Amino acid sequence: MTRVRAACEPLLWLAMSVASAAALGADTPQSWLDRMNAALTSRNYEGVFSHWQSGKVETLRIVHRVLDGAVTERLESLDGSGRQIFRNGAELTCYLPDQRTVLVEKAPPSLLPAGLPKFDASMADFYQLDNQGTMRQMGQKAELITVTPRDGYRYGYRLWIQRSSGMPLKTELIDTNGNIIEEVVFSSLSLPHHIADEEFKPQLVTTGFAWLREDPAPAVTAEGPGVWNNAPLPPGFHLAAQTAQMMPGVTVPVTHLVFSDGVATVSVFIQTEVFHDAPNQVGAAMAQVGSSSAFTSVRSGHKYVALGEVPPATVRFIIEGLMHQSLGQALGVPPQPTSAQLQPTQGGK
Amino acid sequence: MSKEELESQLSAMFDDELPGEECELLARRLARDEQLRERWGRYAAIGACIRGEPGVRLQTTLAGKVSAALKQESAQNGVPATDRHRHGWVRPWVTSLAGLASAAAVAAVAILWMRSEAPALVAHNAPVQNPPAPSLQSLPATAPQLAAVSPAVRVHQSHEPDSYVTPAAVAQAPSLVPPTELANYIVAHSAYSGPLMRRNALSALVAGDSAAPQVNAQPIPAVVTGK
């Protein structure tokens, strides 16, 4: 017996070492982020949460179902405007009763596979990941993972991830100065095995509403992703997806470019010939939609709109880089650094 | 004490699960730590919102603990608490919390904010100024939109109508991207965001007011049928 145990001891030690290493690996920040993404995309869940942003708090309810790989989701405001969003696969329907409007959007196929974001080693150049340990949130044990940007081109995150399920119970978005700019806190969360179809039937009577529905998506434009690959971008960002789609109210296909640094994504929409009557007009505007920044610029009859969960300087950098490249191509001039080569404040908390 | 430990304590305090001694210590810290008070104020507003209360109501026992801690601190410093309240250097943060909670309950702060640098389009080749990064302080605060509401009717399965009001859509200032178009961009963008960012972006869209307060708000009726 002793011999058997002696013979087995090295194997036992090896097994324990492997198990320990696995356990250790399971507690790395990256593994927790992967668990969170997996939980958000693969589990049924429903809950009520508060959304805080810019001093305003609103209560929302979400129902998320994954059935045979198909995602169905309902997101509704429990107070305020009564807005509701339903997602059925690639199609999103937004009911905006306060505007008597319904938006219907269907994501077209992309030239490049998106699959965003990915928490791989490359993001270490631009973000620092830390596990702050096990905390208490909503009466549950949660792992606090911090994602801290290394420069001012991106935001940071503080995520309380439920240890038992991988679901984020609380998230904070942190700006480049360390201020919280958005907070989502669940007050109740359940993970039911079955969610009835009834949950995904809109209850709003839309008589008299304007339905803004895109026309059938056209074939993706002939231009390959290489057209936009040489534009100057903020460090770490790359072209991750490109497509063309019809947008409500726009008669020509809109080019949709997606740039990513592995965590944050920025969409750029390019409309051509939107100002036929005044092709030489120029304009620019910055907008803030929740925690997302949007920058719009009009030049040479084209409209560029960049939108993403990044600081305003980043969307502006991307737009001006693309516009400069576009102009350079028209004139046969290689792209040069533009005034948009901003040096945003170093993020630091 | 780390920031995370403080938050954990604060959370426990809010749930009335923090031991009395720790509660007293934290209350004293709250009295002198402005950032911590702000965070507590946010918790209060979130809690009030979740509970559907018009304002923050401290749990009786929690309020008692805080009050006791403040009184004890006053006694230790040899100054009656009532005198401090009279002089207004202990109570202000409590008052500000109540104000914050009330504001959070009734105010409609714009989430969709458009600041056009050149709403009517500027001259060709005009230099584009780099806009400052919007911060919480720079976002325009808005007055409560109590007058700009629209009636809506929710019909239960029992066919009993249930009336309520929703904020009215508001007229927009001239801009390069109308809010509805911007909302469409958000929806299109969300398809390429990560699951967490997508949910948060759509939450912002759902939670957002129609736009920054503008003139000529018109009530818009809506009808909802539901469970």
Image (cartoon, coloured by chain):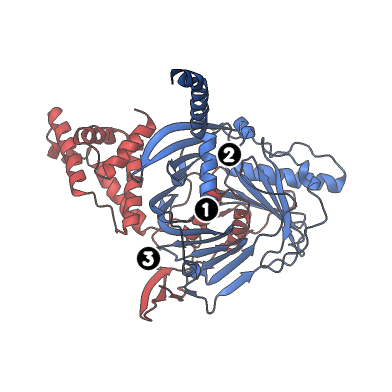
Observer-nearest of A171 and B223: A171
Going by the image, does A118 lie left or right of A181?
Answer: right
At numbered mark 3, what does the secondary structure look like: helix, strand or loop?
loop
Quarter of the image for the C terminus of chain B: give it: bottom left
| Chain under numbered label 1 | B
**CA separation in Å, label 1 and label 2:** 18 Å
Of the pair A192 and B182, the residue shown nearer to us? A192
Q: Which residue is mark 1?
A: B199
Q: Which mark is residue B60?
A: none
Residue A315, compared with residue A22, is above or below; it is below
Name the amino acid type tagged 3: Leu
Residue A78, how many percent across, how many down? 40, 62
Between label 3 and label 1, give the one nearer the viewer. 1
- Amino acid under label 2? Arg
Q: Residue A8, position in %: x, y?
A: 50, 22
Q: Which chain is blue?
A: A
Q: Are marks 2 and 3 in contact (CB under 8 Å)?
A: no
Question: SS class of the residue under badge 2?
Answer: loop
